[in-house]
Amino acid sequence: MKKFAGTWHIQEMETWDEDYFNMEVQAYIKINSQGSGEFQFGLVSGQIDVESEDGDGQRIDFTWAGSAEMDEASGSGWIKWVDKDQIKGKIKIHHGDSSKFLATRAKQQSKGRKR
């Protein structure tokens, strides 16, 4: 689980174009080492609950709850490890659309020097 921890910027989505998925914020998925997190793309956002990790630590499955275009929504998905800077996966809206995605690890912001 630890290697998936961090913030990942969504770069590509199969179903939606960049104008949609980045319309409010840079589309992202954030996962912590305890197996929870959050995401937002376009007008869809939610809280992630990681359900399982495969035996070799290369894939996690999750459920989520949140909203889609201001309506309550939920769904599921999976994320597969590509390398230390890239993941791919799929997110599904229950009784709605689904999309595969590609995401890259967000660059760490360096902290300013204290004076």
Image (cartoon, helix red, strand yellow):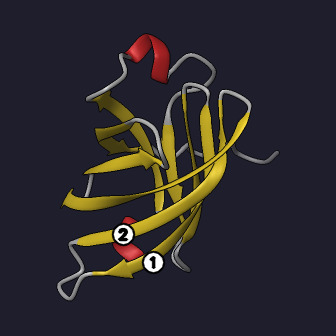
- Residue that appears at 46% across and 38% down: 96
Q: Is residue 83 visible?
A: no
In the picture provided, is 69 more to the left or to the right than 75?
right
**Quarter in which the C terminus is drawn:** top right
- In the picture as drawn, the residue positioned furthest to the top comes out as 19
Q: Tell which of 101 and 110 is nearer to you.
A: 101
- Which label is found at residue 61? 2
Name, please, the residue furthest toward the bottom.
55
Residue drawn at (49%, 40%) of the image: 28
**Quadrant in the rendering for residue 40:** top right
Q: What's the amino acid at mark 2?
A: Asp
State which tag comes first along the sequence, 2 or 1. Answer: 1
> At x 56% / y 16%, what residue is drawn?
23
Q: Residue reaching furthest right?
A: 115
Q: Is residue 29 visible?
A: yes
Residue type (three-letter) at the residue carrying disc 1? Glu
Above or below: residue 113 compared with residue 31: above
Q: Percent position (x, y) of residue 47? A: 63, 57
Q: Position of residue 50 (x, y in %)?
A: 48, 73
Q: Viewed as shown, does residue 51 lie left or right of 25?
A: left
Residue 65 figure quarter = bottom right
Query: Is the residue marked by circle 2 packed among few (<14), some (14-19), or many (20+) residues within 10 Å?
Result: some
31 over 113 or under it: above or below: below
Separation (CA) of disc 2 from disc 1: 6 Å
